[in-house]
Amino acid sequence: MTRTATLDPAPPPDGLDPELRRIATAVVVGGIAVILDTTIVSVGLHQLGGALGATVGTIQWVSTAYLLAMFVTIPLSGWAQARVGSKRLWLVALGAFLLGSALCAVAWDASSLIAFRAVQGLGGGLMMPLMTTIIMQAAHGRNLGRLMATVSLPAALGPILGPVLGGVILNWLSWQWMFLVNLPLGAVGLVLAVRMIPADTLRRRVPLDVVGLLLVSPGTVGVIYGLTQVGELGGFGHARVLVPLVAGLVLLAAFVGWALLRGGTALIDVRLFRHRALSASSALLFLTGIALYGAMLLLPLYWQEVRGEDALGAGLLLVPQGVGALLSRTVAGRLTDAIGGRWVAVTGFALLTLATVPFALATETTSTVWLMAVLLVRGFGLGAVTIPLMTGAFVGLERDEVPHASIVTRVAQQLGGSFGTAVLAVVLVGAVAGAGSVHEVALGFDHAFWWATGFTALAAVLSLLLPGRARPVVAGANR
């Protein structure tokens, strides 16, 4: 008699069940378009100014308008999701982003391009926190480290593909392709979202916190706008910096007071900061924003101003950092699930700190091969810290609290990026002022990189506040 052995299906390599993997795939494909757009456009501002006959100050608004528009809609994402549902809101937001991309490609002057970039930003602002919310709520607290490794894929691919695609487009294609490249990828994302994201069953008629919206949206916009002016004006002591910055901080402080009175009905439930994990993760994401966006200001400029590379060459030289971020995602996700995020984050920030020091010691003759190897390690550390921070932010939260935490973490990282860019721009401008040789310019970059090193070292210490061994999150997800 022949006996047939029955084997259980092997678990998937990433530890995710098929339905969750489908949802994550649909969301990540759409999210990649937004991340790539930001990095592609950032390397092409100079060429855009020349093509449209705009001054440097005017063309900077192509990036500023996008960023400010994002912060108008980010606080609305939680309320909008409750009212219309995750799937419908994702489709609307991605559709608005693609519409803005198409309009940008047919812009006839700088003013129209700036206006259409704002349309892109409105859609992108809804997508960024919603991407995390959809996947975290679908996970029901399972395998969050490995899941966040999937969610972080757009952020990992952005530094790899964005500068390279931007350089290729600027070298061989017209500037319109910086926006047209979003359309095929976004269209695939729309199709996948329609087919793979399940229909919503939990929609609630939540009243809009109008007062909170009138406080938090202009407040964040004011802070971001003030910070974006720092680099252009060379410091914080200017009215165009101080007026919006102080006004924004006052509005945000007023929102915190209002939200505490409103409790769970506030646009953003600030009472969630009583969770140490969310507070620590938000603070660290602020510092990660500095490490990521601040360094992304310094690194391309170093290759161009000190080493004489063009936009494409600088983009290609930054590829190792993105490769390192890709390589660390799976390892960091599994370790976060197994031992908790604390030591994963500490190790990642330590690597990030050590791998920034060589740039603080670099000269105009430092080996390119050596610096590219350092960038690989730096990217590995950067990818490693993102996953435990994003995972830890949701420890112990109820399902209805997840959208609020997604907004908080997104705002923290973006504010950190704006702050880091502003501070390091001022440091760099001051350090290279009056430089008469390439060697003196290199020394100025060294000074700015030491500041970046200090921020990452501080984050390594603060990482000790993160939760230890991972435990289930999004409590009550099945309620």
Image (cartoon, grey):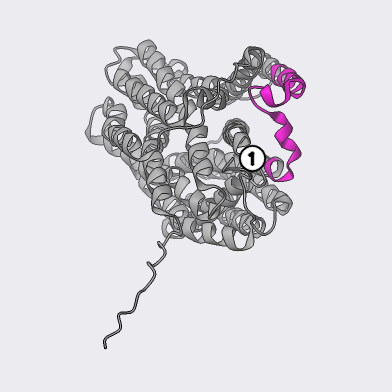
Q: Residue at x 49, y 43 (%)?
A: 138
Q: Which residue is mark 1?
A: 398
Q: Between residues 53 and 445, which one lies in front from this camera angle?
A: 53
Q: Quadrant of the N terminus?
A: bottom left
Residue 229 shown left or right of residue 152 in the figure: right
| Residue at position x 37%, y 73% in the image | 7
Mark 1 residue element: loop
The mark tally for this picture is 1
Residue 396 position within the rendered picture, expressed as x and y whole percent measured from the top left? 67, 46
- Residue 371 is at least partly visible in this image: no
Residue 158 sits inside the magenta stretch: no
Q: Quadrant of the C terminus?
A: top right
Residue 193 lies left or right of residue 265; in this view the side is left
User: Where is residue 286 shown, x and y percent of the image?
Assistant: 63, 38
Q: Is residue 277 magenta?
A: yes
Identified at 65% across, 47% down, the residue is: 395
Magenta stretch, residue numbers: 250-278
- Residue 195 placed where, x, y %? 31, 38
> In the shown orientation, is residue 261 left or right of residue 121?
right
Residue at x 42%, y 64% (from the top left corner): 11
Image coordinates for residue 474, horizontal then vertical, percent: 61, 44
**Residue at far left of view:** 172
Residue 113: image quadrant is top left
